[in-house]
Every structure is written in C-alpha cells, then in structure tokens.
Amino acid sequence: MKYDDVMKLALERGFYFPSCEVYADAQAGFWEYGPAGVSLKNKFLELWRRELVRRDKMIEIDGSQIMSKSVFEASGHLASFADPIVRCTKCKSTYRADKIIVDATKTVIPESAGLDEFDKVISEKNVKCPKCKGDFESSKKFNMMFQVGIGPEGEEAYLRPETCQSIFVDFPRLFKTMRGKLPLGVAQVGKSFRNEI
C-alpha cells in the first residue's frame, strides 16, 4: 500500500487528520487522533500496561508537561538539545545543516562537530540551496524546545521535549513513596514537544 493510500484511508476512517484543518493558515505537522485512532491508541496503551508495566511491577506516573528552566539546565537540554541549521541568503529557506550536506555531498558530519565544521564543508563542497541555488548564511544552533512564560512576569519554563524528565526529577519522592525499596521501575506515557526543523 502506498503512502498516499494509507493517508487517504486514515482520513476517511477517522484514525487521524491534520489539526485545525478548517483554517487555511494552520501550521503543518500537527495532527489529531480521530475516534478510530483514539480506540487503537488505547488498545496499545492497555497492551503496554499489561505486558510491561504490570508484569514487571512498575509504577506509573503522569508528569507535568511544563517544567522549569533549571530542570533543562541541569540535564543539558538548554545547551545541547539543538540541531545545526543554515538559512539561504536569497530565498530565506531554512534547512538542517547536516541533512543538506548529506543530500548534496553524501558527507556525514558527526553530531559532536562544531558549527565551523558545517560552514567549512558547505564552503569547500559549494553546497547551494536546493530551492533557488542561493548561498547559505553561517550555520547556527536551533534549540528544539518550546519556551513558555509562566505568570505575569513570564518566568522562563519549557514544554518537555521527552517524557522521561519527570521520572528523573520525581525519583526521590517516588522512592520515598515506595518505602525505599529497590528495584524500582517507573513508567510514563504522554505527550512531549519538539520544535522540529
């Protein structure tokens, strides 16, 4: 079955559909589960709970989706949860630097490489914008977390980019709640938020 056929079937049967599709300016990449999608998702969750969580005597939490800045400073997310990007000087299109280099040259640059390495390869291999053949600005880091302001002063916080953060920061309380017994397995299912390029 082709991708387009799967998408058509999913839309017709109510598995999922684009979010806010009644508005022409709705951003791409956001989806809603329809009735059939919710039913299927719930069956997977029950299977997961039965075969993993209950079988292994784990506990389950439902952590906050918004967390303080200090959580992500401590975990390194603020410094390193970012992808290198380049922007075309002509048409202003933005791309992941590593992907545009691989597509144009088949050269793979390690994740640990600095921005200067991306700029060097783009310059040496004469990598151009695929849309308009324009040159690229210097590469920069794009943090993939969504920042939110809390309260009237707009205290800095973030939507969680992974579900595991709550488990880590809640572990002392969970350990105490479980009367200090090890091993202790903690499970969580929920939404996480990434500002993808």
Image (spheres, helix red, strand yellow):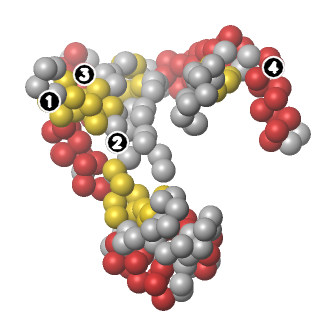
Where is mark 1, residue-wise? Answer: 155
Cα distance in 3D space between marks 2 and 1: 16 Å
Q: Is residue 184 visible?
A: no
Q: Going 11% across and 25% down the picture, which residue do you hit?
A: 153
Alpha carbon distance from label 4 to label 3: 44 Å
Q: Type of residue at label 1?
A: Glu
Residue 115 at what x, y percent from top left? 34, 72
Residue lying at the far right in this picture: please name it: 1
Please say if the residues under marks 4 and 3 sit with CB atoms less than 8 Å apart: no
User: Which dot marks residue 174?
Assistant: 3
94 shown above or below 17? below
The amino acid marked with disc number 2 is Met
The numbered mark, 1 or 3, whose residue comes first in the sequence reads 1
Q: Amino acid at mark 4?
A: Glu
Query: Which dot marks residue 145?
Result: 2
Q: Amino acid at mark 3?
A: Leu
Disc 4 marks which residue? 12
Q: Within 10 Å of the Cα at label 2, are there few (<14), some (14-19), or many (20+) other Cα atoms?
A: many
Q: Residues within 10 Å of mark 3 (few under 14, many from 20)?
A: some
Cα separation, mark 2 vs mark 3, equals: 26 Å
Q: Earlier in the sequence, mark 4 or mark 2?
A: 4
1 or 3: mark nearer the eye: 1
Residue 20 coordinates in the image, percent (x, y) = 57, 21
In which quarter of the view is residue 38 placed? top right
Relative to residue 171, is residue 84 drawn left or right?
right
Seen from the viewer's position, the closer of residues 88 and 183 is: 88
Q: Secondary structure at mark 1?
A: strand
Spatial CA distance of label 1 from label 4 is 43 Å
